[in-house]
């Protein structure tokens, strides 16, 4: 039962969707979530390798198997377990980010990379908080479920983008999710009204 709920795409997407119903806020997240993931990987590229492969040489341009790799791998595996089709695409994006962040880390070096990461993270996070405060008028999901907000966000913005071209993981998925979102938003509205009394 616990395993089933951990990879319950409908439940997770409904939770995410309840906090992201305004089209402008959704667009802001679609633009800024993946750069947050990418720049986190960029910073993790400066961690030492966890182990060395026989074909990896010190002067090689091959990305090392360090914390950036583990970070990308955990995300990729989780996404594939959530949904094979979109999860495989998301996993490919995770590894492209890993390879791309390694190339950028080599070019920038640590002294410039951490400044770039800091600026990018601040800009992307600020944009998302503005999206929630100005357009969604609801606190971000990370305030209610930190792990889900961090782990699921890249996958869900990809799923949102594919939804625009009509992709549905299985028939009835979007209808079921919309029904769950509606229930959650009604509960939230009721709770909000109760607090304002």
Image (spheres, rainbow, N blue to C red):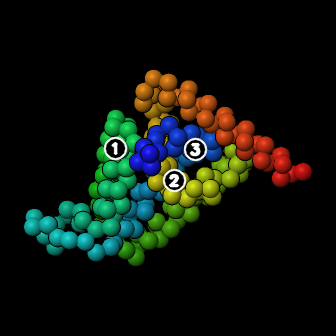
Relative to 123, is 87 above or below? Answer: above
Q: Circle 2 sits in a helix, a strand or a loop, which is it?
A: helix
Q: Quadrant of the N terminus?
A: top left
Residue 130: horizontal and vertical position, in percent?
67, 53
**In the image, what residue occupies the spot 40% across and 68% down?**
43
Hey, which quadrant is residue 99 in on the image?
bottom left
Which disc number belongs to residue 15? 3
Hey, which quadrant is residue 89 in on the image?
top left
Nearer to me, 44 or 139: 139
Tag 1 residue: 80
Are the residues tagged 3 and 1 within 8 Å (C-beta)?
Answer: no
Q: Circle 3 sits in a helix, a strand or a loop, which is it?
A: helix
Q: Is residue 174 visible?
A: yes
Tag 2 residue: 148
Q: Is residue 89 left or right of residue 7?
A: left
Disc 2 and disc 1: Cα gap in Å? 16 Å
**In the image, what residue occupies the spot 32% across and 41% down?**
88
The furthest residue to the front: 1
Are the residues tagged 2 and 3 within 8 Å (C-beta)?
Answer: yes
Disc 3 and disc 1: Cα gap in Å? 19 Å
The furthest residue to the left: 54
Residue 20: horizontal and vertical position, in percent?
61, 42
Nearer to me, 118 or 19: 19
Q: Is residue 133 left or right of residue 94?
A: right
Q: Circle 1 sits in a helix, a strand or a loop, which is it?
A: helix
């Amino acid at each position: 039962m616990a395993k089933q709920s951990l990879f319950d795409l409908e439940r997770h997407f409904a939770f995410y969707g309840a906090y992201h119903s305004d089209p402008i806020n959704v667009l802001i997240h679609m633009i800024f979530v993946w750069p947050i993931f990418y720049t986190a990987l960029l910073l993790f590229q400066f961690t030492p390798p966890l182990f060395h492969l026989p074909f990896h040489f010190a002067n090689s341009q091959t990305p090392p198997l360090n914390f950036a790799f583990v970070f990308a791998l955990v995300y990729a595996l989780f996404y594939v377990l959530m949904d094979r089709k979109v999860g495989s695409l998301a996993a490919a994006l995770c590894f492209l980010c890993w390879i791309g962040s390694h190339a950028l880390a080599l070019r920038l070096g640590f002294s410039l990379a951490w400044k770039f990461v800091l600026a990018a993270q601040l800009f992307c996070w600020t944009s998302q908080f503005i999206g929630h405060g100005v357009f969604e008028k609801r606190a971000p999901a990370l305030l209610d479920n930190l792990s889900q907000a961090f782990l699921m966000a890249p996958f869900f913005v990809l799923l949102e983008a594919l939804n625009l071209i009509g992709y549905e993981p299985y028939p009835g998925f979007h209808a079921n999710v919309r029904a769950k979102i509606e229930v959650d938003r009604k509960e939230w509205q009721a709770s909000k009204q109760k607090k304002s009394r």
